[in-house]
Image (cartoon, rainbow, N blue to C red):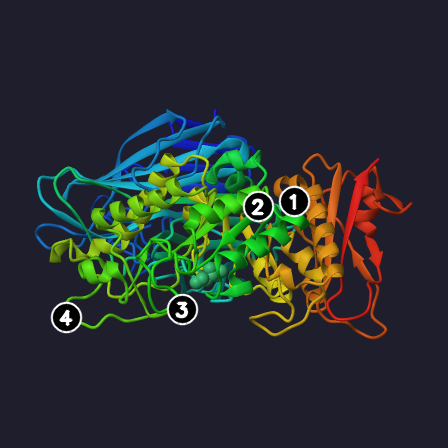
Amino acid sequence: MAIIFDESRKLFRLSTTNSEYQIKVDDIGLVIHNYYGRSTCDTDMSYQILSVDRGFSGNLFENRDNRGRSIDVLPQEFSGCGVGDYRISSVGVVAKNGSRSCDLRYKSHEIIDGKPEIPGLPSVRPYDDDVTTLVITLEDKVIGLEAQLFYSVFADKDVITRHTRFVNVSDKKIHLEKAASAMLDVQFGSWDEIHFAGRHCMERQMSRNKLTQDIKVISSKRGMSSHHENPFVILCDHGATETYGDCYGMMLMYSGNHKIEIEQDQAGSTRIVAGINEENFSWCLEASDAFDTPEAIMAYTPSGLEQLSHIYHNIIRENVCDRKYMEIKRPVLINNWEATYFDFTAEKIIDIAKTASELGVEMMVLDDGWFGKRDDDNSGLGDWFVNEKKLEGGLKRLSDEIGKLGMKFGLWFEPEMINEDSNLFREHPDWALVDPDRHPTMARNQMVLDMSNPKVEDYLFNCISKILDDANISYIKWDFNRSITNVYSKNLPNKKQGEVSHRFVLGTYSLLERLLNAYPNLMIEGCSGGGGRFDAGMLYYCPQIWCSDDTDAIERLEIQEGTSFGYPVSTVGSHVSASPNHQTGRSTPLATRGVVAMSGTFGYELDVTKMSEEEKAEVKEQIKTFNKYYWLIQKSDYYRLVNEEQAEVYKAWEFAAKDKSEALVNIVVKKSQANAKIKIIKLRGLEEDAMYLLEGTDNMMSGAALMYGGFAINIAMGDYPSAQLHFVRQ
Ligand code: DGJ
């Protein structure tokens, strides 16, 4: 049983194959976090919670004679506020009488087979996995607020998902000012926090910092999960490496304003609280109303960062993304954006598609500029009607022509946006998020639609459906090219304006859900100026997300590596683009661009009609290579192979089949050096005593030799050379 309740000890044990999580209800109804780590062989870990009287850490009334037991230091499952725990609160309230205190105690619990859905929000899908859910209901009897804590244990995946449902069980209004999804108190240890920070064109760069008595905040208030701070953190042993050390992961399945706070307290224990960012958030709960938070995906491993990544890769591929993509091969695509930008005609797109189809490309994606008055990025957003001046014969003709080439057709949209210069804005200025007494803040000369307004959602559903019905479209690239400001909905009363940011996200999720229900074979690729909304929430709807607007292969090494800590390669949109690169001006060999783009959902984004015959022949080979390794890349275990010392000079990474039958090693040299050192690549994930043949050679080595001795390579000269090595078990 994945969840066991021991009535006599008031102890819950949540077990996965390689981890155990304990919760204990104490004598005054506090829900104590007892333990999260390796299996304890049925030991109640509360013996670790010692009684210490700490100055200025007060005691709840029932504990007034027990001064060693203060909620300011006790590890808990979900902190209240205003009653003596001075660490990060999980909840913020304003009760009818103005009180801002909340004291949550155990009320009841329930253990359910499977996993309930979260209304209106994406959540990790149980499918037919071994999943059990524990719901512990906490209650503040004074204000009549319940917090139902949901824990779903994915036993075989080593994952516990969490979310909170707040219910107003009083007969008066309660304002929620903060509503965390999950909290984790880790009592002991010397920890580093790792998060993934960045900017447009350089997303998800690992930032690792030793924790001290302080609060670290990873957040976004941009209305999107953002290029700047991804909603994923790792807490790892100070000495943890790829293969060693305790690691905890907390990932929020949410695409809007998020906040993950990490605090090391006076006693050296560490608290993580994850949820919606409370800035710009206030939710009015009328009597018997409920509010569900987004889900958090939590994992623990004692075996280092690589194993933590594998846990997240497995759950995202199999239970966050639609599982059908584990079996359906996604097409190698060509996108016209960097080939033409806004300057194209139907004939030009057909030319690109024709050449690409001869090379083996399977889908043509028409990017921005096909609709309304859209010859640059200043106008047209919202007018989702084909521009027949540019595309003679419309999308029907274009998709038919592309179909005749044996290719699928995909189309770009940016549904949540509107230009001032658009028919939509002229007809419905009140559909944009605009603060009534201010000029809107512009970005890329566009504004953001009010996705909290059901009329906006219906309009977009109808426009997109019409386009999908009229032409043969298998794929949508769903873009989002600015951060949100002026969060004010003309559709909601003043007192509900604090709900708009979250209702916006719910509106977007609802639109995605409706479209996928209406068009079950449609594939949606997420995008937000590259990877500004690369999160588990979007991955629920989109099996792949354009990883970055930076297509430079060398920069992509860093971006894709940072992304790999939490997200599998199967979700990473990656294309071969032109050289010199449009973002950096750097020239890289076509082969290297191919190797880097193959660590993702492979495609091209350049004018293939301008390529030499030699280059075209190389592209043909690349596509064959990618198709040959497709399932290995999609389903295998991913290994980051280079240590920090070497990372300046080259990067190496590996896809090793789960059954250890083969491995593909990729190497890209970032800095060519005269008289360079031999590069020793130590493989991982092989069978020690099996023999592996390096394909295309007679070299046969044991798994142990390749893993512990390593493979020696003296890679070619020149700028940014690369290699791909395929080892096959004999
Ligand atoms: C940003 C995307 O990331 C690009 O790939 C492209 O689609 C542009 N938007 C189009 O405006």
Specify the label residue 570 is tagged with.
2
Instruction: Give me the C-alpha separation between circle 4 and circle 1.
Output: 52 Å
In this view, the residue in front, 112 or 560, is 560
Q: Residue at x 70, y 62 (%)?
A: 590
Quick one: quadrant of the C terminus?
Answer: top right
Q: Earlier in the sequence, mark 1 or mark 2?
A: 2
Q: Earlier in the sequence, mark 3 or mark 2?
A: 3
Percent x, y of residue 177: 22, 54
Looking at the rendered structure, the secondary structure element under dot 2 is: helix
Looking at the rendered structure, the secondary structure element under dot 3 is: loop
The image shows residue 237, relative to residue 379, as above or below, that is above
Which amino acid is tagged 3? Answer: Asp
- Beta carbon of the mark 2 residue lies under 8 A of ligand 1: no
In this view, the residue in front, 249 or 425, is 425
* Tags 1 and 2 touching, CB below 8 Å: yes
Q: Earlier in the sequence, mark 4 or mark 1?
A: 4
Instruction: Give me the C-alpha separation between circle 3 and circle 4.
Output: 29 Å
Specify the label residue 437 is tagged with.
4
Instruction: Give me the C-alpha separation between circle 4 and circle 2.
Output: 45 Å
Which amino acid is tagged 2? Answer: Ser
Which amino acid is tagged 4? Answer: Asp
Which residue bears the numbered disc 3? 376
Percent x, y of residue 452: 24, 51
Q: Residue at x 46, y 40 (%)?
A: 320
Which residue bears the numbered disc 1? 633
Q: Residues within 10 Å of mark 3 (few under 14, many from 20)?
A: few
Which amino acid is tagged 1? Answer: Ile
Q: Earlier in the sequence, mark 3 or mark 1?
A: 3
- Residue located farthest toward the right when viewing the structure as drawn: 698
Q: Earlier in the sequence, mark 4 or mark 2?
A: 4
- Is 262 on the left-hand or right-hand side of 708? left
In this view, the residue in front, 81 or 518, is 518
